[in-house]
Structure formats: structure tokens, C-alpha cells
Image (cartoon, rainbow, N blue to C red):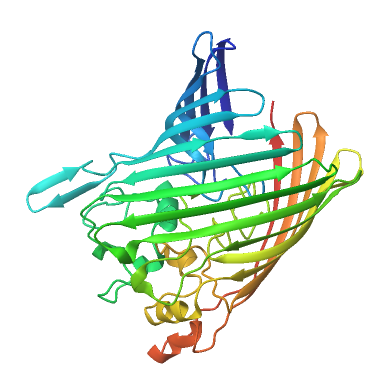
Amino acid sequence: MRLQLDAVASESLSGTVYFEIGEQLWGKAGDRNGGALGADGASVVKVKRAYIDWMVPQTDLKFRMGIQGVELPSFTTGSTVLNDDVAGVTASYQFNENVGVTALWARPFNDNSDWRRGNHQYSSYMDNMDAFALLVPLSFEGVKVTPWGMYSAIGPNTFRQGDNFLAGPWGTGSYAKAGLVPVGGALHKNGSSALNARKLSSYGEAWWGGLTGEVTAFDPFRFAWDFNYGSVTWEDDGRMNRQGWLASLLFEYKLDWATPGLYGWYGSGDDSNPANGSERMPTLSANNTNRFSNFAFDGDPYIARNGAIGHGMGGTWGIGARLKDMSFVEDLKHTLRVNYIGGTNSPTMAKKLSLNGLYANSGGVDGVAGMEAMYLTTQDSALEIGLTNTYQMYENFVINVEADYIALWLDNSKSVWGSRHKQGLGVPETRDAWNVNASFVYSF
């Protein structure tokens, strides 16, 4: 359950606090669940957002300060770089009806590290991460374009916990680590895929840039695109660097009964050399944003069991078709998606990962940092089919029923993932994925 309370003094001043209660597993006891018989256990109550909105008097300059939802611009998939709750300050100004600007300072991580060196205990030392973004939305008749950029400074202990380097804290930190470092730490020269051997002693830095837009001048035809590029560099370990790009296109045509669409995307992938870091685009947190896929990627707004291929789309390419918001009965809508997904990572890199004990699905099984749920090479592919049904039973009550299926084809030859056989190990079994879920949403 999510409860948002707004205290509105005027159009120029308001405050918001947004609570989240749960998740609850029915029948489970414990102070962090409360779902067992009797139901008296304390459930988890979290502050999802807490911020104030205010305007500078006699101007159009707006500020939002506090823990807030931030999504970087996108007109196709939703942001594949950052879409999450984060603490920070946002300032926005509308110069005229065509030109605006938004500036952001956010602090995703700070004061989380706790470690010891000799007899000295270090807590919250050089462990902050700060991000600064600038967005310039441009709007004209039938055309919208938004160029944007973001820079981030990363402390060497931002992801350090205990005696492990680049290890913690987990939770939301795992999203950041999965998106900011190469898979398995790019297989450090000691041959280990573990990250606790990466002793970064200086700050890292990251930056992203993008250009996104849409054309609706030829309504009911719509054309939209996104292009993003990102880079993360660590001064004292080039194997930990990561940089790459991701582009997507969408064509759709609105009919009375549905909106058919065709789309595609391409994300740069790792080459065959682990010593030069990763060639996949880094991400900070792509959380429940993907509009092309509800199951393969992180797109379902209600159900957490998604991201079967990955939270982001880096290292993959794909084409898809959808029929969005089909309606033949009043208040009942359907969306059908079909996606063909391929990998852009080098098969030689996969062979090296396999020889070091990592497999295509190691990210989902072992939580290997830098590795998405599935690591797809140019020899691997998947097919996703999804159907979403939404019934608006009452004005404030929606029933959502969804079914998804992913057929997966991995290259288990000795030149790719099957190289594990050289160590006398079997190839771990990877099955097709499916998911059926129902959501009952009351909002007011």
C-alpha cells in the first residue's frame, strides 16, 4: 500500500510525504512482515518520498527539495539511465512556451561504508556519490526535443562494506553496481571474478548525455527516438571502466480501436578484451520504466517479478511489434507485444566468463556485480510474447491481468558458454521463462 499526503498552502508552496507499506508475504511471521495467523506483526513502513515544492515570488522558477522521483528524458522506452526515488534538489524554469530548463543535484549514496584498516575503524569515509544533471526541453508545434546531460562524482568507498571493495551496500546499491562496473569486474588479472580484489583508492567519475524527441505533426502517426551515451572511469583500474551507447526508435499509428506500433533498439556490447573494461552503456537505476517490455526488461508497473533478461537494455538489440490499448468492449483494454531480442556482447568474452565459472544467467543466480539477469552474446537470442488486459471496473478501481512468455536460445557450444566442459563442469540448465499475474489497484 502506498499513501501520499499533500499539504498545499498555495500554488507556490506545498509539501508531500509518500509512505510505502509492505511488501507482505501472506502467512509469514516476523517483525518485517506481519502476515502470519493473528496478523499482529509489524509490517515494513518506508518513506518512499518526502519533499517540498516552492516558487520564487514573482517568477516562474520552481524548486523541489527532498527525496523525490527522478526520471531522465525518454520518448520511447522510458529512461534506461535513471528512473528512481533519490534525495536531491530540482530547479526548473520555463522561459517561454517553447523553451524550458531543469537542473538537478542528487545524492544517491553517502555514509554507507563501514570498514577497518589495521586498528582503525573507518565509517562514512570518501563514500559519497553526487550527480548533477541539466535538461533543456524544447517544444514546438508537432515536435518535441530534449537534449540532456548528467555528471557524477563517485567516492572510492561508495560501494564498500566491511573488508570488501565494491561489495556493498546491497539493496538499491545492487542496481548501481550492476550498471556501473563491467561484468565480474572484467575478470581481474588475478583470475578472480570477485570484486573484493578491486582496491580503488581514488574517485571515479561518470557522465551521460542524450537526445530524445518525438514528432506528432502528422497525427495520427507518431515517430519517437532516444539516443543515450554514458561513461564511467576509475583512475587506478582501467579494467573497471565502462562506456557505451543505446539507441531506440518507435513508429506508431493511432486507430479508433488500437494503436499499432513497430520499434527497435540497439545497445553497444562488450568486446573480447576484458582488460579494457566494458563497452556496454552504464546505468544508475532503470527501475520499472521499460515501455517495450514488461517481462524481459523492467517494465511492469505493479509486479516485481520482471527483468528476466535485465533491468537495462545495454548489451542487447531487438525489434518488436505491439498493439497497444486494443478495445472492443467498453472499459476493457488489451496490449499485445512480440519482441525478438539478441545480444551484442562478444562470444569470446562469454567463453572467458564461462572458464572463470560465470554463466549466462550468473547475474540472476549468484548476484555477480556488473552482470544483468542474462548476459547475451551475438550468438544468443530470445523471443518474448506478452499480453496485458486492463479492466476499469470503477472510476478508481482497475483489474490488471497479464501473461508473458520468453523462449531463450543460448549457444552452448565450446566456443561460447559450453567451454565449462573443459573444466569438467556441466552447462547449467537454462529454461524458458513465463509469468502470469493479476493486480487489483484502487487509487484515489
Nearer to us in this view, 416 or 114: 416
Percent coordinates x, y for residue 41 in the rendering: 47, 36
Nearer to us in this view, 146 or 435: 146
* Number of marks in the rendered image: 0
Q: Is residue 415 left or right of residue 212?
A: left
Percent coordinates x, y for residue 111 in the rendering: 28, 39
Q: Residue at x 62, y 66 (%)?
A: 317
Q: Is residue 299 visible?
A: no
Q: Is residue 418 left or right of residue 368?
A: right
Q: Is residue 410 visible?
A: yes
Residue 284, above or below 191: above
Q: Residue at x 45, y 82 (%)?
A: 351
- Please tell me in which quadrant of the rendered image residue 192 appears: bottom left
Nearer to us in this view, 68 or 283: 283
Residue 427, above or below 366: below
- Please tell me in which quadrant of the rendered image residue 408 appears: bottom right
| Quarter of the figure with the N terminus | top right
Percent coordinates x, y for residue 279 in the rendering: 45, 65
| Quarter of the figure with the C terminus | top right
Percent coordinates x, y for residue 265 in the rendering: 64, 60
